[in-house]
Image (cartoon, rainbow, N blue to C red):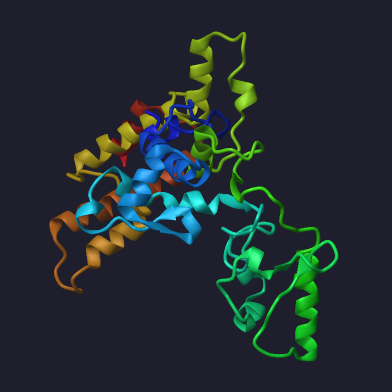
Amino acid sequence: MVKWGVVCGDKENGGLGIRKITIMNKALLGKWTWRFASDKEALWKHVLEAKYGQEDHGWRTKKAVGACGVGVWKEILKEAGWCWDKMGFKVGKGNKISFWTDVWCRDSALSQRFPHLYILAANRNAKIEELWDQNVGEGGWNLRFIRDFNDWEVVLVGELLQALRGARISWEDDSVFWKGGGSGQFRVKEAYSWLDRLMDVNFPKNKIWVGRVPTKIMFFTWEATWGKILTLDRLQKRVARELWDLVLGLVGVKWVFPKTVKEERNRLAFRGGWGVLAIQRFKYSFVCYIWGCAKLYMEEKPLSLLDFLEWVASS
């Protein structure tokens, strides 16, 4: 049988496209994190703000703790981390976005891209509008630091200004966008695909799921690709397993060795010191001897069960 985790994978990865409940639940809970940040005047949002309070300029509620921390919203907040990793800010007025710590300029926060300048910043919690000077021509950045720069630090400032080139504030409200899709809007399907990274294989989807091929044949091919049908080589392995079960049963051995026969023989025969060997350990030695002789006799030639048993009896 194919593992359920494989069945629940995307068809591109060899699965059947069945959704995993755990991951789907995370994606659905994450959507509420998105809605809280993107819905501006929703009544349910105002209720949560009144109950838990705000932080991060109103993009999130405070953590649900104490008597208020038991319920649906507490579970939703547990999924906020990965959701915010896939969200970015679109600058409008700049009054709700932190200049250094929020992700608004490319794919990472400026504090991560320029950590040395972040340490020297006069106000590390400054919002974008506080560092924008509208009185300089068409507007420009007025960055403030705690001291003058050394020569090598001037290069970092130049790189920072280059990264800020083209960025400016407007009269629109600040907003968020979803980085996991082309539309910029949160989609449960896209969030699910991003969360589901358990299977990273190159699966021949287009050669299996063909429109005009009967469903039974497509499923048969899918199972064969995962090695879960009784092909000729697998049947031969099954016969070999039954053969060894028979031979091992003759000497009282109950299971196939996890290692090579020789290594397992030595481990069992000499464990616990070099004292008197038990009868059971001699049985393992006998099986090892049978295997070594059989390899010389067969020389990789096909051998029927009857021929093998006759060879064992005559040896």
Is 59 in front, or is 180?
Answer: 59
Residue 251 visible (yes or no):
yes
Q: Is residue 240 above or below residue 102?
A: above
**Quadrant in which the C terminus is drawn:** top left
Residue 288 visible (yes or no):
no
Indicate left or right for 61 with 169 as reference: left
Q: Give me the residue at 23% from left, 52% from top.
A: 68
Q: Give me the residue at 61% from left, 46% from top.
A: 179
On the image, the x and y values in percent for residue 5 come to 40, 36
Q: Is residue 46 above or below residue 8?
A: below
Indicate left or right for 56 with 305 as reference: right
On the image, the x and y values in percent for residue 303 come to 43, 30
Is 207 in front, or is 184?
Answer: 184
The residue at the far front in this view is 135
**Quadrant in which the N terminus is drawn:** top left
On the image, the x and y values in percent for residue 138 come to 83, 61
Q: Is residue 52 above or below residue 314?
A: below
Q: Give me the residue at 61% from left, 38% from top.
A: 202
Q: Is residue 190 above or below residue 110?
A: above
Residue 165 falls in which quadrant of the image?
bottom right
Q: Give me the residue at 61% from left, 71% from top.
A: 111
The residue at the far right in this view is 137
Q: How many marks?
A: 0
Residue 100 falls in which quadrant of the image?
bottom right
On the image, the x and y values in percent for residue 142 come to 73, 73
